[in-house]
Amino acid sequence: MSHTWSTASTCPERASVLHEPNGVTPRQPRIVLTAGEPAGIGPDLCLMLAGQQQAAEIVVVVDPDLLARRAAQLELPFRYRLFDAASTTTQHAPDELCILPVKLNKTVHSGRLDTGNARYVLDTLDAAIDGCLSGHFDALVTAPLHKGVINDAGIPFSGHTEYLAASTGTPDVVMMLATETLRVALVTTHLPLSQVSAHITTERLQRVIQVLHRDLQSRFAIVQPCIGVCGLNPHAGEGGHLGREEIDTIIPALQELRDQGLKLIGPLPADTIFNASETADCDVILAMYHDQGLPVLKYSGFGEAVNITLGLPIIRTSVDHGTALELAGTGNIHSGSLQMAIDSAVSQCIRA
């Protein structure tokens, strides 16, 4: 979708201005936030954000009428101004949201999915992506959407990560989740388990590791990243007795990259790699598939983790949880993961 443009932080110690060319006044990052599935907790999180100090200007892509109705349901104040792309970046003002409006297709009832609004959700994403690619925004943060209702509306959709890759023309992206103490990246993302092995190829594994290595250097200022790699099979294949993917694919792929100077450990069994002494200094653990690595990370830091898409020409972070339909409109939610996502986006902007 093409979009037509009109002409503080919980971590105050962190630098929060972008370096500009000589003679240009430094400015704070401008972060665009999509509100996600309208029947879920995304709108609630945006309203909670309004009362918090941020280290960036936050622009929310949403139908303001949706937020007005949700605010009334939650008995929260709601005040907003419309985003003007020609305006100078300003710090997020507590108790006021800056909104880039996108119109809903159907009236929303908290907690009740409606296929009629599936296209709206993708329209908000498209507007945010267009804004990042055109330079109006420095980074994208996404609230949770619901893959099922989008597919039920007849729109094939496997997730934010894949959609962003297609929308930006990026062939190789990497999904990485992070807490304060652990990073986990994935070789494959939203695939049925029966298809994972066929997608673990030498080429794919090397491309993922190269993206991971490069972005850990450029976005996280890690000079020589150390990547711990999981095996695919139980016991990392047990010398070929429990599967040959390690012998035939993973080990040769890692050795070629080691010969190029990359620091890699593994493949190690997934049931021990997170506790192994030899991976204690690893900057990230690379899992072969979604439910191999993410249960460990989410157990250790659910609600305080951030989802980061590496390899894109834009900075993108997200929450670590879903739409929580049953909690929408109740006020019984926490914004910790959204705050982590915003803080991570700001930090990456500063380093870019």
Image: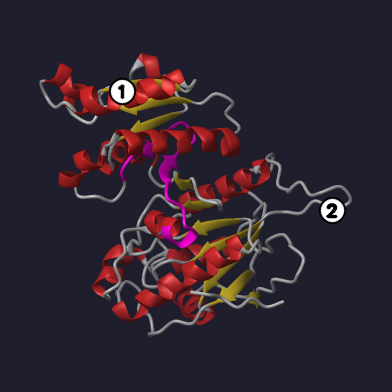
| Snapshot quadrant of residue 235 | top left
Is 32 placed above or below 204 here?
A: below
**180 is within the stretch colored magenta:** yes
The amino acid type found where label 1 is placed reads Pro
Provide the residue span drawn in magenta: 166-188
Q: Residue at 73% x, 48% y: name it.
A: 18
Q: Which residue is mark 1?
A: 252
First in residue order: circle 1 vs circle 2: 2
Q: Is residue 350 visible in the rendered structure shown here?
A: yes
| Snapshot quadrant of residue 242 | top left
- SS category of the residue bearing label 2: loop
Badge 2: how crowded within 10 Å, few (<14), some, or many (20+)? few
Q: Position of residue 113 (x, y in %)?
A: 30, 74
**Render colour scheme:** secondary structure
- SS category of the residue bearing label 1: helix
Q: Which residue is mark 2?
A: 25
Q: Residue at 53% x, 63% y: name it.
A: 129
Gap between marks 1 and 2 measured at Cα: 50 Å
Q: Position of residue 123 (x, y in %)?
A: 46, 74
Task: In the rendered structure, find residue 219 and report the number of the disc placed on it.
Answer: none
Horizontally, is 167 left or right of 328 in the view? Answer: right
In front: label 1 or label 2: 1
Is 10 placed above or below 237 here?
A: below
The amino acid type found where label 2 is placed reads Thr
Q: Is residue 273 visible in the rendered structure shown here?
A: no
Q: Nearer the viewer, residue 299 or 26?
A: 26
Looking at this rendering, what residue extends furthest in the bottom direction? Answer: 106
Q: Quadrant of the C terminus?
A: top right
